[in-house]
Image (cartoon, rainbow, N blue to C red):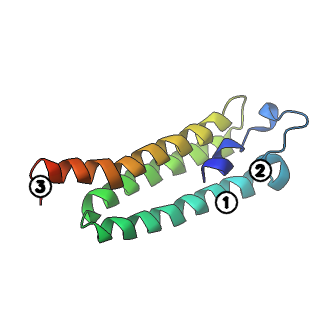
C-alpha cells in the first residue's frame, strides 16, 4: 500500500525513466489498487484489534482514515495537477503511522495507565 501510494503520480509529475504504477497501469487502476490494498489492510487491522480487545477505537480510526483516503483519491483523480499525487503518497504515510500507533502504541499506553 505504501509502495503503490509512493509511486502514483499525476501525469505532469511523471519523470522519464522512472516507472510508476500510474504510468504502468493508468491513474484509475493505480488509485483503485491503492484503495483496495488499503481496504485489505483495514480488514486485517480490525482483526488484529479484535485480538487485543481494542476493536471499537481502531474501527473508529480506520473509518476516519478510509474517509480521508477516499477524499484524497477523489481529489487526485478529478484534478491530476502538478503535485496532486503527493496527496496519495502522504495519505499512505499518514495511514501507516496512525494505524500502527492505533494498534500498537495506544492500546499499550492505555493498558499501562490502568485501562482494561
Residues at marks 3 and 1, CA–CA distance in whole angstroms: 38 Å
CB contact under 8 Å: marks 2 and 1: yes
For image coordinates 33% across by 61% down, the residue present is: 59
Residues at marks 2 and 1, CA–CA distance in whole angstroms: 9 Å
Label annotation for residue 33: 1
Which residue position holds label 3?
Answer: 115
Q: Which is nearer the N-term, disc 3 or disc 1?
A: 1
Q: Is residue 28 above or below residue 11?
A: below
Label annotation for residue 7: none
Residue closest to the far front = 112
Q: Which of marks 3 and 2 is in front?
A: 3
Residues at marks 3 and 2, CA–CA distance in whole angstroms: 43 Å
Q: Is residue 12 left or right of residue 88?
A: right
Name the element at disc 1. helix
Q: Nearer the viewer, mark 3 or mark 1?
A: 3
Packing grade of label 1 (10 A; few <14, some 14-19, many >=20) is some
Packing grade of label 2 (10 A; few <14, some 14-19, many >=20) is many
Name the element at disc 2. helix
Q: Is residue 42 left or right of residue 115?
A: right
Q: Position of residue 14 (x, y in %)?
A: 82, 35
Which residue position holds label 2?
Answer: 21
CB contact under 8 Å: marks 3 and 1: no
Amino acid at each position: 500500500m505504501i509502495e503503490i501510494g509512493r509511486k502514483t503520480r499525476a501525469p505532469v509529475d511523471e519523470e522519464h525513466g522512472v516507472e510508476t504504477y500510474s504510468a504502468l497501469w493508468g491513474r484509475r487502476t493505480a488509485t483503485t489498487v491503492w484503495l483496495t490494498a488499503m481496504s485489505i489492510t483495514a480488514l486485517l487491522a480490525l482483526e488484529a484489534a479484535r485480538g487485543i480487545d481494542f476493536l471499537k477505537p481502531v474501527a473508529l480510526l480506520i473509518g476516519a482514515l478510509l474517509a480521508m483516503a477516499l477524499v484524497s483519491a477523489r481529489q487526485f483523480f478529478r484534478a491530476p495537477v502538478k503535485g496532486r499525487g503527493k496527496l496519495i503518497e502522504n495519505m499512505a504515510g499518514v495511514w501507516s503511522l496512525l494505524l500502527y500507533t492505533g494498534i500498537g502504541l495506544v492500546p499499550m499506553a492505555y493498558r499501562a495507565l490502568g485501562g482494561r
